[in-house]
Image (cartoon, rainbow, N blue to C red):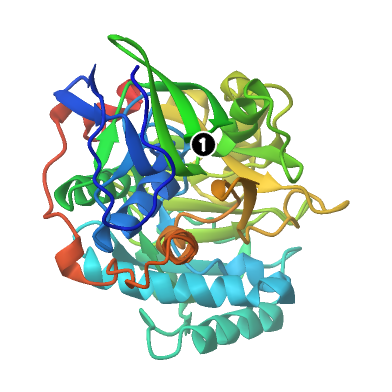
Amino acid sequence: MGQSTPHYLSNTINLVHLRVEIMTKEATLKLAGRYRVVVLGGGIHGVGVAHDLASRGWKDVLVVEKSIVGAGTSSKSTKLIHGGLRYLQHPRDFPLVAEGLGERALLTKLLPEIVKPLPFVFPVMKKGGMPRFMIKIGLMLYDFLSRGRSLGTHKWLSTEQAFNDAPILDKSVFKGFYRFYDGQTDDFALTQRVADSVRMLGASVVEHTTVERIMHDQNGWRITLKGPDGVHDVTAKYVVNALGPWAHELLDASGIRPKVVGFNNSGIHLIVRDLGLKAGLFLQSPEDGRIFFVLPWEGFTLIGTTEDIVDGPADSCKVEQRQVDYLLERCNRFLSVKLTDSDVISKFTGMRWLARGGDSSISDTSRTHLITEHRESGDILYTIYGGKLTAYRALSEELGDKIARAFGDRTASATKKVESWAPARSLPPDLQVPRRFEKI
């Protein structure tokens, strides 16, 4: 490649650079030799940061995705847009819950066709589990934290009401039921919608392109990309490492020492037939205290999740039979319908990329995000840890503020405005449910 432009001198610097072409599956994307920001990873946080910057008028932003946008761990979640009721067990996470509830209200307003309210049934067990008074306190606090932006307040249900919402519950196990409300989404469609908005606002997203390495030289951060038509370099003043479970693999390959210890926490989900639920089930395993969900979703039933530390490369993470057995066994304790392996239509594992915090157990590790900075001559490499699907936009705005302020730009984020969002579109047939189960 030719000589790239030196460091940026102002917002209005003339971006005339060598251009290369990288073929994606859908179209030929002309890739500039230099950007203000290159975002590595086309998951929800990667496209979220790009959307935030593009909403401020930044068009010289590039997202690089090795597969298709949202095909990684961002499409392997529990599909909830929620505050995280279970996080109220830890007072340190109250701000995390409050933030999630605020984002839940915003996303249901901005994207009503993708993010929708969902009632939940929270049963009180006859033996084990949380006592009724503790559940009541938690739900009252959840309502309090969502005041002014609630999807509905909690209430005590009659047995008839509970079984109308969830006819598959085993009556012999429970002595009462609460209802509360949260949000549900199609996480893949949400990530695609954010990427559509990035493109609509003039920034770039390239798919089927891997990041080979990143290094710093006199021109800033130099990122080596490998696409279908070969290897190319681009440079940037700021780089956002939003690779999630693969974040440290790139840093290690590039000889860059991470600022913190990160680890991958995997969680599996099962898809079974529609079990007739009109509400989600919020259930607790008495032995280990783990919360898991049984949810109506896209004409099927979604069950999840588990928690295990992943040893080894992120790509080595697979669904294990013991995890499937765990979920089926826990479900069968509480449901009148007894599920077996033969009922499982699809199963998938997602990973939560977290920063290590002392000797905390996996469940006790906070999901509060952390953004580290690696500075070289005024150029910054950011790496994202933690974060939740629900609060991706708030995280993106926070990082967008950091980047914009570092560049001297005081323009505010506009991702809270519907004008910054691309219109809804239908996904290609092979990426719609249920064919998606085989595709990604």
Q: Position of residue 341 (x, y in %)?
A: 51, 25
| Front one among 208 and 152 | 208
Disc 1 secondary structure class = loop
The residue depicted at 28 percent of the width and 29 percent of the height is 436
Q: On the image, which quarter does residue 184 sit in?
A: bottom left
The residue depicted at 63 percent of the width and 47 percent of the height is 375
| Front one among 262 and 156 | 262
Q: Is residue 375 above or below residue 85?
A: above
Q: Local crowd at mark 1 within 10 Å, few (<14), some, or many (≥20)?
A: many
Q: Is residue 191 left or right of residue 382?
A: left
Q: Is residue 129 left or right of residue 120?
A: right
Residue linked to disc 1: 243
Q: Is residue 124 visible?
A: no
Q: Is residue 260 left or right of residue 404?
A: right
Q: Position of residue 329 (x, y in %)?
A: 63, 38
| Front one among 53 and 331 | 53
Q: Position of residue 135 (x, y in %)?
A: 64, 77
| Front one among 345 and 385 | 385
Q: Is residue 313 above or below residue 48?
A: above
Q: Residue furthest right?
A: 359
Q: Position of residue 357 (x, y in %)?
A: 80, 53
Q: Is residue 7 visible?
A: yes
The residue depicted at 72 percent of the width and 73 percent of the height is 92
Q: Is residue 120 left or right of residue 360?
A: left
